[in-house]
């Protein structure tokens, strides 16, 4: 009997999905390959007792996908999304060396960074995401299917935005898909606030989707190359080649626009202000309410990253000459030092330490305390630790999920159910004590109509309008 192949695609013109599902039955063996259209995808193989059981299993899988909206297609007609990776011609700094306490080699140029209370996160263009303790010890490793654009936190949820157009939730044992971006969007940057995702792109556009990954609005700016998007309750702050534009949260209407000296290459925000680093070597400090400039900070080369201490008392910047800067709030430059490990693609400050991710793939921890900086300016440096993680295995992103019988639900476990509503797949909590009308933010690629899942934790969103699943997820039999 010749092998039988079924090829399906789900590509939504209005917003999110752009993926394929291929099932091959060859005798007693069933091979299933799935992933983003135009990419190689992941393959799972199973062997059955006889050909009839193999065919039955394949038909069941195909039926599940068709009910989700997949349809027969011709492989190769739809193309892979466009991807732009940021390139910096990084040169060596002529400044004195910064006091680097430790440096972790991630293995490829690194863009994603988040520094939390307990762990530091770094993601690189190979799709590796590592977690480290604040002393530099590696504590974990995730594997994503494509390069990491950025890592963002939303309350205590951690997300990684990738070149494959997906945003992965890193809050469980394995990464799972939380959002999928339309195929025609060449993603430059991402940010999330209370489940609302903002995406800025190569064409200078901005797209907003909600916690259910449903399109809300999009706008095209007067510029292009939008490397900045920062989301907040009052809206989105969008930085591009012509400056920074604030759009209202609900409508997407422009609230204000601020011209910048040079194209915006990075953005940061504090409760009252936003900061934009530019190609002309400036960091602009703008009022979130009005867009008025309250200060600006002068660097010696193009600014590819910036950050502040809490409240903006100190402003930090990284240029494409492998230097980092610190300024007082009024614009006074306090110091400039060399990273020693390439130019900083991104950075974050916490507890008198400046963490940077760089062109050579490093996550470096710089002691930014006044005493350490003063000593470094005199040529006195701490002993630096160089860290690798060769022995750590990747925990790969997957659409597979463990199963458990309903009688084995532990105390404190919460049950959710997938249902079809208005042509969309929704998830609601069915355990006692929860509002069953609220939607649950739940991984996209494991939803099956009528299926019930056991989740470790359910939390109410900051706005109170929906629930968010966190931790381990198992399917109930």
Image: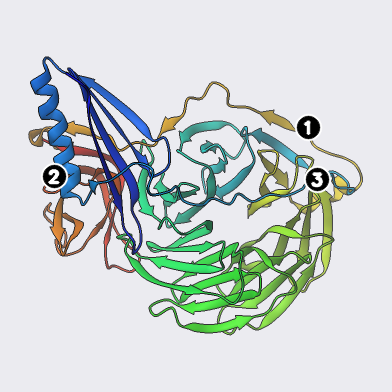
Give residue 98's mark.
3
Q: Nearer the viewer, mark 2 or mark 1?
A: 2
Query: Which quadrant does the N terminus fall into?
Result: top left
Q: Residue furthest top?
A: 49
C-alpha gap between disc 3 and disc 1? 12 Å
Labels 3 and 1: the sequence-earlier one: 3
Which is more toward the observer, 99 or 268? 268
C-alpha gap between disc 2 and disc 1? 55 Å
Residue 448 in view (yes/no): no
> What crowding class fits label 3: few (fewer than 14 Cα within 10 Å), some (14-19), or many (20 or more)?
many
At 48% from the left edge and 32% from the top edge, which residue is drawn?
140
The location of residue 468, given as percent across then percent down, is 29, 55
Give residue 419's mark.
none
Residue 279 in view (yes/no): yes
Query: Which quadrant does the C terminus fall into?
Result: top left
The location of residue 59, given as percent across then percent down, is 13, 34
Give residue 383's mark.
1
């Amino acid at each position: 009997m010749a092998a039988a192949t079924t090829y399906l695609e789900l590509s939504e013109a209005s917003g999110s999905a752009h993926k394929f599902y291929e099932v091959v039955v060859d005798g007693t063996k069933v091979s299933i390959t799935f992933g983003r259209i135009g990419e190689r995808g992941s393959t799972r193989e199973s062997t059955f007792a006889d050909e009839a059981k193999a065919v039955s299993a394949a038909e069941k899988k195909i039926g599940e996908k068709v009910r989700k909206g997949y349809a027969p297609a011709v492989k190769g007609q739809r193309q892979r999304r466009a991807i732009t990776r940021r390139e910096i011609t990084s040169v060596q700094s002529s400044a004195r060396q910064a006091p680097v306490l430790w440096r972790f080699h991630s293995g490829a140029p690194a863009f994603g960074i988040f520094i939390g209370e307990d762990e530091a996160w770094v993601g690189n263009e190979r799709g590796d995401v590592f977690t480290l303790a604040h002393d530099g010890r590696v504590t974990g490793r995730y594997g994503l299917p494509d390069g990491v654009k950025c890592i963002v936190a939303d309350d205590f949820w951690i997300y990684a935005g990738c070149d494959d157009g997906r945003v992965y939730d890193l809050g469980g044992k394995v990464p799972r898909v939380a959002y999928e971006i339309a195929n025609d969007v060449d993603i430059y940057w991402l940010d999330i606030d209370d489940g609302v995702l903002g995406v800025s792109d190569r064409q200078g556009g901005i797209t907003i989707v909600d916690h259910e990954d449903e399109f809300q609005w999009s706008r095209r700016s007067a510029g292009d190359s939008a490397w900045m998007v920062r989301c907040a309750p009052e809206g989105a702050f969008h930085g591009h080649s012509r400056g920074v534009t604030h759009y209202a949260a609900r409508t997407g209407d422009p609230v204000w626009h601020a011209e910048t000296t040079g194209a915006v290459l990075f953005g940061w925000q504090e409760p009252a202000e936003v900061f934009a680093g530019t190609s002309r070597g400036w960091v602009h400090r703008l009022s979130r309410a009005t867009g008025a400039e309250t200060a600006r900070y002068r660097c010696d080369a193009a600014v590819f990253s910036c950050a502040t201490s809490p409240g903006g008392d100190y402003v930090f910047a990284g240029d494409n000459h492998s230097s980092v800067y610190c300024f007082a709030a009024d614009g006074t430059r306090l110091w400039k030092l060399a990273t020693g490990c390439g130019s900083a693609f991104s950075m974050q400050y916490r507890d008198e330490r400046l963490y940077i991710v760089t062109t050579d793939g490093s996550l470096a921890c710089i002691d930014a305390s006044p005493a350490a900086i003063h000593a470094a300016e005199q040529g006195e440096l701490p002993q630096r630790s160089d860290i690798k993680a060769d022995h750590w295995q990747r925990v790969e992103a997957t659409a597979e999920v463990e199963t458990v019988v309903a009688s084995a639900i532990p105390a404190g476990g919460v049950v959710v159910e997938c249902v079809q509503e208005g042509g969309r797949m929704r998830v609601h909590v069915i355990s006692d004590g929860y509002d069953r009308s609220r939607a649950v933010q739940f991984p996209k690629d494991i939803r099956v109509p009528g299926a019930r899942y056991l989740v470790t934790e359910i939390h109410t969103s900051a706005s109170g309008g929906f629930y968010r699943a966190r931790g381990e997820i198992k399917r109930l039999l």
